[in-house]
Image (cartoon, rainbow, N blue to C red):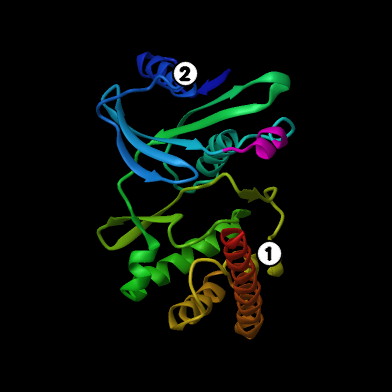
Amino acid sequence: MKIVSRTSDKAGELLKRLTTDILDNKNNSNNAVVVHSGRNKIWRENVGGEDVAIKIYGTSLVKSIIYIFRKTKARKAYENALELTKRGVATPAPLAYGERRGFMNRLIKSVYISVYEESTPLAHYLDCENVDVIDQFSCFTAMLHSKGILHHDLNSTNVRIIPAPGHATFSLIDINRIKFIPVGITVNLKDRFNNITRFSSLNDNYIFFVKKYLKYANLPEALFDTAIQSKSRHDTKSSRIHKIKNILKFTAKTK
């Protein structure tokens, strides 16, 4: 078992004990509130007077073997949160991660714990067509790229918003799939435009976003068509993959 925690005080010991109990399937807290239940499980719990978010990553036989050689999602989330903070980007403060491994280091379970953050998904503001927030999000995205940050799950639920007077504070979650470009190296156009394809369909909101993004990233307006073409290719590919998955699911059910 491996447990890494940022703190060494009483709260840190509580976190380590909690992480150990989770990895050992012994956590039976009465104050836990389920936030998400699916392939990965997330719940909120009060630890030492502070609300924390606990995420257990689902695994399979194949993945348990793959993670013999790779960093676990829990570890990557923890390390990425530290790097985001270092680069001045908001994310729920990382507290700890833990891993339980079996024979020949095969992964059995991994867990990531962060501070619980009250926030609203970007999706809510897109649905309301809130142009002020979309404008601010385009500025935020340009800032991410200027800092060499490519969140490969930059969708409308993984971008969270904490309202503040006159502006919105953006916070990133589900951060195990982030690529950090070394400081001083500029993110190329292909990576930039591919990175902004997931949070919305190709609609008026997206067109508005792209125009503002080019402005805040100090890129020529002439690149607008290139960005839209990148989005169209992504949507076509995504639709094709979705159809194939549905066919495979239907085939499996009829067998």
Residues in magenta, as a range = 59-66
Residue 113 x/y as whole percent:
44, 32
Residue 159 in view: yes
Query: Which residue is pictured at 44% across the width and 20% down the height?
Result: 7
Residue 63 is a magenta residue: yes
Closer to the camera, 78 or 201?
201
Residue 16 numbered tag: none
Query: Which residue is pictured at 60% across the width and 81% down the height?
Result: 228
| Mark sitting earlier along the chain (2/1) | 2
What residue sits right under mark 1 in the picture?
A: 191
What residue sits right under mark 2 in the picture?
A: 20
Disc 2 marks a residue whose amino acid type is Thr
Disc 1 marks a residue whose amino acid type is Asp
Which quadrant does the N terminus fall into?
Answer: top right
Question: Do the residues under discs 2 and 1 have CB atoms within 8 angstroms?
Answer: no
Q: Residue 253 lies in what quarter of the image?
A: bottom right
Q: Is residue 140 left or right of residue 11?
A: right
Q: Is 87 above or below relative to 223? A: above
Q: Residue 132 lies in what quarter of the image?
A: bottom left
Element carrying mark 1 = helix
